[in-house]
Amino acid sequence: MGANTRLDSLSDLIKHKANVKLICPCGRVHIFDAARLNRYALLRSWNTQLEALRYRVRCAECQGRGVRLKATPEPPTPADPFPRTEVEWKRLHRRLRG
């Protein structure tokens, strides 16, 4: 990434092959795959700007909101809350659609 690269949204992170590091005030750190988080956010009709997303995501430990989101080249941590298969993604989409 160049010195003038701004990573403000999930699509910017995907374009630059970066992941999202979530840092909670309780000290927990988790790394999500940016593409999977982007797909989940779009299914929920959330704004995909990192500043807006920080108030949507919640820590699994303390249930606190307002985590810090940063771009990172590190690989995602193994456990994530997103569907694993295309069938599960479609099931989630149908459920959210009503």
Image (cartoon, helix red, strand yellow):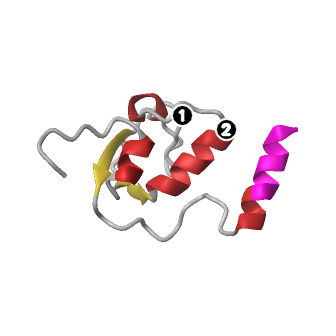
Q: Amino acid at mark 1?
A: Arg
Magenta stretch holds residue 92: yes
Q: Which residue is labeled 1 in the image?
A: 56
Q: Earlier in the sequence, mark 1 or mark 2?
A: 2
Spot occupied by residue 71 in the image (x, y as percentages of width and height): 30, 49
Mark 2 packing: few (<14 Cα in 10 Å), some, or many (20+)? few
Q: Secondary structure at mark 2?
A: loop
Spot occupied by residue 45 in the image (x, y as percentages of width and height): 65, 33
Q: Main SS type for the magenta part?
A: helix
Q: Which residue is labeled 2 in the image?
A: 44
Q: Which of the two residues, 60 or 18, is positioned nearer the viewer here?
A: 18
Identify the magenta region: 90-98
Q: Residue at x 72, y 58 (%)?
A: 89
Spot occupied by residue 69 in the image (x, y as percentages of width and height): 36, 42
Q: Residue at x 60, y 58 (%)?
A: 81
Q: Are marks 1 and 2 in contact (CB under 8 Å)?
A: yes
Q: Is residue 90 left or right of residue 80?
A: right
Q: Is residue 75 above or below residue 31?
A: below
